[in-house]
Image: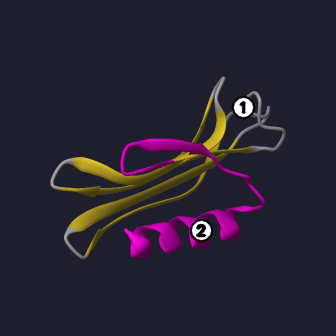
Amino acid sequence: MASQLVFRSRQQHKAGLIELVVWTVSKPVPPSGYGFKYRLVYVVAGQRVVGYDNERGKGDHKHLRGVEVPYRFVDVQTLVADFMADVEAA
């Protein structure tokens, strides 16, 4: 099975743009141990303010105003809720 899009959303939010993209994958993206690949970003004036992703080799992490920190993935619903909480805090 190839990757399959779960959802994609792109919308204006306050002074910026939010884009959420989540796929299911047949094999986990190392070092993650589950079947999702994701990219969530909040951009203001061309600059990433908040970003979450599970890049191959890095695993789950988030970017908060230029600082990268680990993120613990639980499920997609929690991922989106955590991301939006960080967007609102920014």
- As drawn, 55 above or below 8: above
What kind of residue is marked 2?
Asp
Give the x, y percent position of residue 20: 46, 58
Residue at the location (53% across, 64% down)?
83
- The percent coordinates of residue 66 (x first, y second) are 37, 43
Relative to 84, residue 3 above or below:
above
Quick check: is 77 in the magenta stretch? yes
Secondary structure under the numbered disc 2 in the rendered image: helix
Please tell me in which quadrant of the rendered image residue 18 appears.
bottom left
Query: How far is disc 2 from disc 1 in space, using C-alphas?
Result: 20 Å
CB under 8 Å between callouts 2 and 1? no
In this rendering, the count of numbered labels is 2
Left or right side of 9 for 17: left
Image position of 90 with respect to 49: above or below:
below
Looking at the rendering, in which quadrant would you find the C terminus? bottom left
Q: Residue 10 appears in which quarter of the rendering? A: bottom left
Q: Nearer the viewer, residue 23 or 43?
A: 43
Region of the chain picked out in magenta, as a range: 63-90
Residue 8, image x, y percentages: 47, 58
Residue topped by disc 2: 82
Earlier residue among tags 2 and 1: 1
- Nearest the camera: 40 or 68? 68
Q: Which residue is mark 1?
A: 29
Name which residue lies at 58% across and 52% down: 22
